[in-house]
Structure formats: structure tokens, C-alpha cells
Amino acid sequence: MADPNIVYFDLETQRSAAEVGGWDRIRDMGMSVGVTYSTAREGYEIYGEDRVNDLIDELLRADLVVGFNHVRFDYEVLHGYTVLDLGQAPSLDLMLDLQKTLNHRISLDAVATATLGSEKTAEGLQAIEWFKQGEMLKIAEYCCFDVKITKLVHEYGRAVGEVFYHNKFGDRCSASVAW
């Protein structure tokens, strides 16, 4: 039996919540760049807005989509482009899974720095500024790095059964996972 195709996924937006009228209008934010890493392909794919349907197709065909806050946020951005329900894709949202264990939300950066010793290279609001400046390559690099961090955190948690995070006081804590 072939190994399952795990697709790691992240996207960046064209506009902020403030620019579209609030967090209840996520689907109006627009995608600037989406990135996947497919274990079947053993490589990354970068999608611009002109290829958003190809991205949606890849996600729906995956055996498992792994991301960080992608169920509530990234999928909702993509719902601005399709009538298909991305919630039907088999998904593991690392943030939601950790939130169930910890009873609070946590950032990818808090997990990545404590688990991997590697921090994010920028923030989503910076990516929006890059979009406004036409710096698509910078967005793609940033988004690829976030996908890589998500993949490494997931693989670590699967192998070890726990990940680490920095709490709001800066302490390094552990959380058991069953990924």
C-alpha cells in the first residue's frame, strides 16, 4: 500500500481583517500566495491567485492536509473562490489540536521556537505589505518557510509524541500529541 499523500499548506492574503471590515469577512481578504508541500510529490508548489483552483484541487485530493490555523482561516480565504466545502478535506490543524490540549490558542512561532529552535521569518501583516509593493517572491519565500516549519513540527510530534511551546511568560512547556 502506498504511503498517504500528506499535503502541508499555508497561504498569505492580499488584505487584512481591518481592510475588509473584520474577522467575519475572511473570505474577502483574497489570496496573494498559497504554498503546499506534498509528500507524494516530495516537493513544494507555489500558487498565485491565478492558480487558486489548482491549489483547491490539490487540497481536496490529499489524503491529509496539515496546517496551522488553516481550517478556520486559510480554508475560509479559499471559500471566497469556490463553492466547494474545503471542510470536507481530511485535515489536521495543529493549532486546533494543541488548543484542545492546552485550552488556549498558541502561535506557530511559540511552538517552532521551543520545539525546533527556529522562528518564523516574518508575520502575515508584513506579507500584506509585500503584496501591496508587488514583492511576490518575498511572500512566496516566507510562505514556503512557514510550510516547512509546519511540516517539521508535525513530523517531530508524530515521531516523539509531544511538542514544546513557549507560554506567555516565556517558559518552555511540553504538550502531548497523537499525530
Image (cartoon, rainbow, N blue to C red):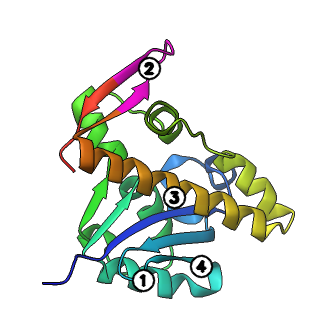
Q: Residue under circle 3?
A: 148
Q: Residue under circle 4?
A: 47
The secondary element bearing badge 4 is classed as strand
Identity, as a three-letter code, of the amino acid under mark 4: Tyr
Identity, as a three-letter code, of the amino acid under mark 3: Lys
The secondary element bearing badge 3 is classed as helix
Q: CA distance from mark 3 to mark 1?
A: 15 Å
Identity, as a three-letter code, of the amino acid under mark 1: Arg
Which region shows up in magenta? 164-173
Q: Residue furthest right?
A: 133
Task: Give the crowd class for mark 1: few <14, some 14-19, many >=20 residues within 10 Å.
Answer: few
Task: State which mark lies toward you, 3 or 2.
Answer: 3
The residue under the point 48% across, 17% down is: 168
Please tell me in which quadrant of the rendered image residue 32 appears.
Answer: bottom right
Task: State which mark lies toward you, 4 or 3.
Answer: 3
Q: Residue under circle 2?
A: 167
Q: CA distance from mark 1 to mark 2?
A: 36 Å
The secondary element bearing badge 1 is classed as loop
Q: CA distance from mark 4 to mark 2?
A: 34 Å
| First reached walking from the N terminus: tag 4 or tag 2 | 4
Q: Look at the picture and state if 20 lies above or below 178.
A: below
In the picture, the disc for residue 176 is: none
